Image: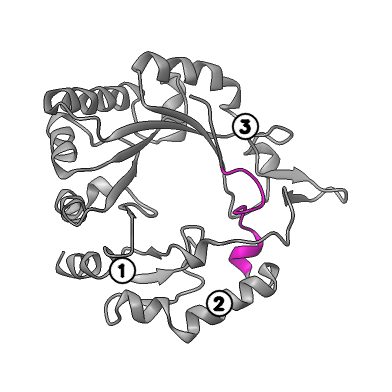
Amino acid sequence: MNRFIQIIDEVSPTTFTVLVHFQGEPLMNPNIFEMIGYASSRRMISEMATNAMLIDEEVSKQLINSGLKKIVITIDSPIEREFGFYRRGGKLGGVIEGIKHIQQARRDKNSRYPLVVVELLALKGNVDQIKEFVGLCKKLNVDGIRVKTAHLLNLDDAENKVPMGTKYSRYKVANDGSIALKGNGSSSCSAPWFKLSVTHDGWVVPCCFDKSSTFIMGTIITQTIREIWFSHHYNNFRRRLIRNRNELPVCSSCPQGRTPLDFHIG
C-alpha cells in the first residue's frame, strides 16, 4: 500500500484516470478500498472491472465511500442456467443482486457514482442472446450497456469460440482460409504514449494487451514511474512500434487501432 501511495503521489499531477484492475478480480485485494480512496483524494478518476460475485451490501457501501467513479460488470449470459458455463461457480442472480446493492448504496449516499456499466463478452454461444441481455440491463436501469469483442491468445478452433462473420468478432477468415484479425495490420497505436499497465508483482508493461508480460519496461519495486516512462528501453519500444508493429509479437496480434474492441448499445 505504501508503494501505491508513492506512485499516486508521483503521477497524480499529470494523470487523470487509474484502472484498479488487470488480469484478476480486484475485489480480492484486501487494500482495494483504501487504494481507490487515496486515488480519489488526489483528484484521480478511478474505474474497476469486476465479475461482481463478491459484491454485497457492505462492499457496495465501501465502493461508494471510496469515491469509485465507474464500475464495469460482466454478464456473459442473461440466462441463469447458461451463466455458469462462462463463469464457473457464478450465479447470475448473485450478480444482479450486486448491481442492485450498488444502486441502493448510491441512493443512500445521494451519489451518482460509481456509474454502473454492464457488458457481455461476445462468444459464439451467447451472441444470439444480445437482445435478451440488453433487455435485462434496461430492466436493471444501469448507466451503460456494451458488448465486448473477445480476444484470443490462441486462434486454434477460433471458429468455435467467437461469432465469426458478425461485427462482434475481432477475427475473420482470410483468403487462404486462415483466421486473422480484421483491419489494417499496419495501423498505428497510441497506447504507449498515454498509458501503461502494472502487473500484480510490480512489472510495468506497455498496455493491458500484454497479458503475459512479454515486453517489460521496468519495475515499480526499484524504479519511479518517471524513470520507466522516459527510459531508453521504453522509447526504443515506441520507435519499434512506429516502424512496424508486426515486428512485435504482442502488437502484431493486438486489435487496438485495427478493429472495434466493444460496442456501446445503451
Residue 105, above or below 33: above
Residue 97 percent coordinates (x, y): 26, 22
Q: Disc 3 or 1, which lies upstream in sequence?
A: 3
For the residue marked with disc 2, what is the amino acid?
Phe
Does 97 sit left or right of 79 as displayed? left
Q: Disc 2 or 1, which lies upstream in sequence?
A: 1
Residue 89 percent coordinates (x, y): 34, 34
Q: Disc 2 or 3, which lies upstream in sequence?
A: 3
Q: What residue sits 63% from the left and 38% below the top?
A: 162
| Measured Cα–Cα span from mark 2 to mark 3 | 35 Å
Residue 159 percent coordinates (x, y): 70, 39
Write down the residue under mark 1. Answer: 201
For the residue marked with disc 3, what is the amino acid?
Lys
In the image, which is nearer the foreground, mark 2 or mark 1?
2
Report which quarter residue 263 is drawn in: top right
Question: Which span is picked out in magenta?
Answer: 249-261
Crowd class of label 2 (few under 14; some 14 to 19; many from 20; radius 10 Å): some
Crowd class of label 3 (few under 14; some 14 to 19; many from 20; radius 10 Å): some
Magenta part mainly helix, strand or loop?
loop
Write down the residue under mark 3. Answer: 124
Q: Secondary structure at mark 3?
A: loop
For the residue marked with disc 1, what is the amino acid?
Asp
Write down the residue under mark 2. Answer: 237
Does 94 sit left or right of 82 as displayed? left
